[in-house]
Image: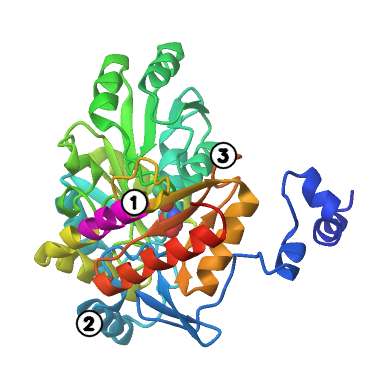
């Protein structure tokens, strides 16, 4: 079939979308008011956003520490744009490395407790570049089934194979490790904090298995750094910094910017620096974003109470939802899922909350397994108690009306 014809068919004929496993196509969803994507925000001040002139409480953001509106972070970005302009217009490899990138790398390495760090333009590119640089034809990546898409895509780009194990299932991880050829280089890769469920990877159990089978361990801590372990992430929270070989983080969440980093042993980082195509063949992180991430790191170090606050809010919300009869899964972080199951029910609940003034994110397959649709709620250190009380009361009213509780 002609490629463009395929696209037209998807949007115009509901049967085509259904045959592909979607209950409806985006156009039908829009006509029914059930389309939850690409909603433009007219204004955003962190915990409150404006959509079509209406103010909503935002509980769908990864701005965990609330730093996108922090005066020092904003000012650092403005000053850097004044000094360096809006873009580096080149790769880190050539004209695109600033002293700011190097400073950020030194500070990050110290912060997470590793020898060296390397900054990329996004977290997505960090995972693509790291996995494709490290994994040769004979090597194996062993990944949790619920790992982030960027790790899956990085594995596809790498020359070696990806073997997946059941989510957070140590016995299944051992089964996969045991079956790996002896001479293969092995890299176990997990999310530190799983981005949809807010669950932690059981690192204290994964570390000894890696040692037993001679595998290296990489943790994608996009949702952990800045948030748990006193801000130093999942690896610090479990006290396994020296046992985890590579720690990945992103600036698009707690760091109030965009960009990503990989941290580890000096020579490995040096290798990645010279072989990661997603860094070499793409322009570097603009100065404003590097400066914002640096300023965010300053705030993290100087205002540890923000980490405590966001976790206290999450605990309060988990208890609030639980008391109303919602299933919040096994979250231990500021990501608190509301498990719904049925895809259409989840989207209807999302819309009712949106109309009542609460912005959440709805996750349906393929972001989550079939039959496991959920509302992903997430919290910021800057949310007020009043906002949180309002959210719980709206969830009570809407959940009853929608037949969820
Ligand atoms: N890893 C995880 C676990 C993530 O959740 C994300 C972003 N959602 C990324 C990597 C990619 O990060 P970025 O947005 O910086 O590209």
Label 2: few (<14), some (14–19) or many (≥20) C-alpha neighbours in 10 Å: few
Q: Is residue 294 above or below residue 208?
A: below
Q: Residue at x 50, y 64 (%)?
A: 398
* Residue nearest the viewer, comparing 178 with 373: 373
Residue 315 painted magenta: yes
Q: Position of residue 186 (x, y in %)?
A: 39, 24
Q: Is residue 17 left or right of residue 370?
A: right
Bounds of the magenta segment: 311-321
Label 1 SS: helix
Q: Position of residue 76 (x, y in %)?
A: 24, 79
Examine the rendered structure and indicate whether residue 362 appears above or below residue 165. below
Q: Secondary structure at mark 2?
A: helix
Identify the mark nearer the N-term, 3 or 2: 2
Q: Left or right? Give the position of 34 relative to 382.
A: right
Task: Please tell me which residue is depicted at 23% across the width and 68% down the height of the picture.
Answer: 296
CB-based contact (under 8 Å), mark 1 and mark 2 = no
Q: Which mark is residue 369?
A: 3
Going 33% across and 23% down the picture, which residue do you hit? 215
Q: Is residue 226 visible?
A: no
Q: CA distance from mark 3 to mark 1?
A: 26 Å
Q: Which residue is mark 2?
A: 71
Q: Nearer the viewer, mark 3 or mark 1?
A: 1
Residue underneath mark 1: 323
- Report which quarter residue 239 is drawn in: top left
- Provide the secondary structure element on which disc 3 rests: loop
**Of 31 and 135, the residue lying toward us:** 31
The majority secondary structure of the magenta stretch comes to helix
Membership of 67 in magenta stretch? no
């Amino acid at each position: 079939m002609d490629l463009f014809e395929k696209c037209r068919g998807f949007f115009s004929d509901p049967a085509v979308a259904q045959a592909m496993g979607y209950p409806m196509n985006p156009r039908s969803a829009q006509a029914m008011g059930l389309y939850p994507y690409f909603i433009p925000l007219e204004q955003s001040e962190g915990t409150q956003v404006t959509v079509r002139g209406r103010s909503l409480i935002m509980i769908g953001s990864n701005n965990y520490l609330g730093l996108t509106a922090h005066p020092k972070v904003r000012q650092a970005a403005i000053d850097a744009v004044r000094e360096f302009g809006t873009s580096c217009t080149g790769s880190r490899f050539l004209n695109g490395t600033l002293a700011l990138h190097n400073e950020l790398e030194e500070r990050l390495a110290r912060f997470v407790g590793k020898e060296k760090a390397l900054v990329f333009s996004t977290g997505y590119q960090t995972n693509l570049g790291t996995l494709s640089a490290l994994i040769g034809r004979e090597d194996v990546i062993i990944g949790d089934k619920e790992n982030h898409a960027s790790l899956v895509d990085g594995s596809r780009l790498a020359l070696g194979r990806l073997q997946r194990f059941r989510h957070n299932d140590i016995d299944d991880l051992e089964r996969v490790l045991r079956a790996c050829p002896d001479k293969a280089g092995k890299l176990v890769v997990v999310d530190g904090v799983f981005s949809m469920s807010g669950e932690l990877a059981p690192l204290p159990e994964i570390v000894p298995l890696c040692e037993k089978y001679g595998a290296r361990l990489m943790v994608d801590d996009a949702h952990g750094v800045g948030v748990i372990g006193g801000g130093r992430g999942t690896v610090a929270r479990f006290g396994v910094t020296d046992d985890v070989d590579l720690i990945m983080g992103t600036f698009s969440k707690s760091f109030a910017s965009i960009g990503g980093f990989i941290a580890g042993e000096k020579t490995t980082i040096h290798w990645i620096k010279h072989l990661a195509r997603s860094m070499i063949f793409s322009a570097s992180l603009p100065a404003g974003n590097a400066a914002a991430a640096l300023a965010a790191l300053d705030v993290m170090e100087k205002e540890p109470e923000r980490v405590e606050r966001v976790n206290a809010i999450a605990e309060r919300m988990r208890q609030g939802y639980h008391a109303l009869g919602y299933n919040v899964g096994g979250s231990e972080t500021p990501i608190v899922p509301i498990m719904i199951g049925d895809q259409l029910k989840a989207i209807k609940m999302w819309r009712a909350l949106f109309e009542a003034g609460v912005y959440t994110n709805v996750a349906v397959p393929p972001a989550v397994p079939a039959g496991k649709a959920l509302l992903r709620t997430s919290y910021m250190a800057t949310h007020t108690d009043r906002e949180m009380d309002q959210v719980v009361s709206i969830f009570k009213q809407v959940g009853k009306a929608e037949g969820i509780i």
